[in-house]
Amino acid sequence: MHYPRSTGEFQSWFATDADCLDYLEWLRWPEGFVCLRCEHAGGWAVADGRYKCAACGARTSVTAGTLFDRRRTPLTVWFTACWLFGAQKGGLSALSLQRALEIGSYPTAWAMLHRLRSVLVRPGRERLAGTVEVDETYIGGEEPGLAGGRAKGKKVMVGVAVEVTEPHGYGRCRMTILDDGSAATLHPFITASIEPGARVITDGWQGYRGIDKLGYSHEPRSQRAARARGEDIAKLLPGVHRVASLTKRWLLGTHQGAVTEAHLQSYLDEFTFRFNRRNSHNRGMVFYRVLELAVGHDPVRYRDLVLNSQPKQEPPAPPGRRGHPPSIDRPRAARPWRTGPVR
């Protein structure tokens, strides 16, 4: 009852912008309108489509103060973007979104996806618990004149933590860009990602020394000792190696490796969001969660997204394709395939 379970249901639920607006209203105020200014519960709809507070008289729109604040793109387009973003298990690129929704410019599609990525980290989310593997990996591509896989400036160090369930399997994960592999960097990553009292498994790197004093049960596994015993060192921390490998494959597959360091954390947040919901019974639930987070998030402006980097620049769109994407809310076509010759 709360979310569509198929593409057909999605199309029937959200055929018009009014349907989308009503759904956002239900998500934001399930118990009725609440004023943003004075937090008074109670008010009524006025002629301009906004709500007027019964206490202070302030007028508020359903989308004000949310991810959809001051939008110029029709809500039907936004909802379709959210459906494609959530329903496709591997996600989608900005170019694919631009083509699917007839968006006139690449930067518009790029910004829509980055706005969605910005809401995926829920404030106050639960930290990992139980048995947790922690390691670092390097993400990035080759650069001329830089030899070695870990050369400074060539790749970005990323901290990975993943829950290990018994007898086999993995739970949730966390991924964060790290400045370096020192204890001053690794310890805050562990405390921010893992609940105290958890059993933390790491390799023998010296940066992990002392985490037992932070309230964790630390189990270091030495790669050198495993190599001396003839064991496969990849099996010391299989969970983080699996997650790191899936992340790199996803970046190379869906996004063709075209991810800059300035926006890498946003992509890591998206992968974490998808990985932690990989066992959802229905992809519509992921769509519902994205919208639920979007209405509870502050507006994200385009200037905030391009603060450190610029999106891909494209030549001007041809005549007839400029401007905002058309709404999905359109009159029914009269079987256009019958009106012209077959080519």
Image (cartoon, helix red, strand yellow):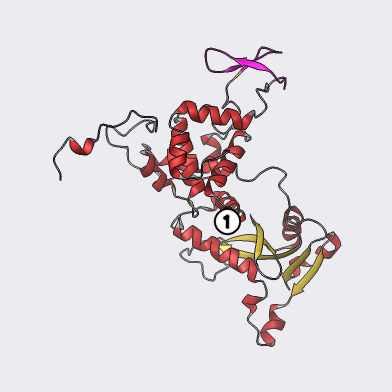
Amino acid carrying label 1: it is Arg
- How would you rate the neighbour count of disc 1 (Cα within 10 Å): few for under 14, some for 14-19, many for 20 or more? some
Q: Nearer the viewer, residue 5 or 107?
A: 5
**Magenta stretch holds residue 48:** yes
- The range drawn in magenta is 38-59
Q: Relative to 54, is 331 above or below?
A: below
Residue 314 falls in which quadrant of the image?
top left
Q: x, y (%) of residue 240? A: 64, 66
Please tell me which residue is depicted at 56% across the width and 13% down the height of the picture.
46
Residue 268 falls in which quadrant of the image?
bottom right
- Which residue sits furthest left? 341
Please tell me which residue is depicted at 45% across the width and 56% down the height of the picture.
254
Write down the residue under mark 1. 278
Horizontal arrangement in the rendering, residue 200 relative to residue 273 (left or right) = right
Please tell me which residue is depicted at 56% across the width and 50% down the height of the picture.
270
Q: Nearer the viewer, residue 265 or 93?
A: 93
Main SS category, magenta section: loop
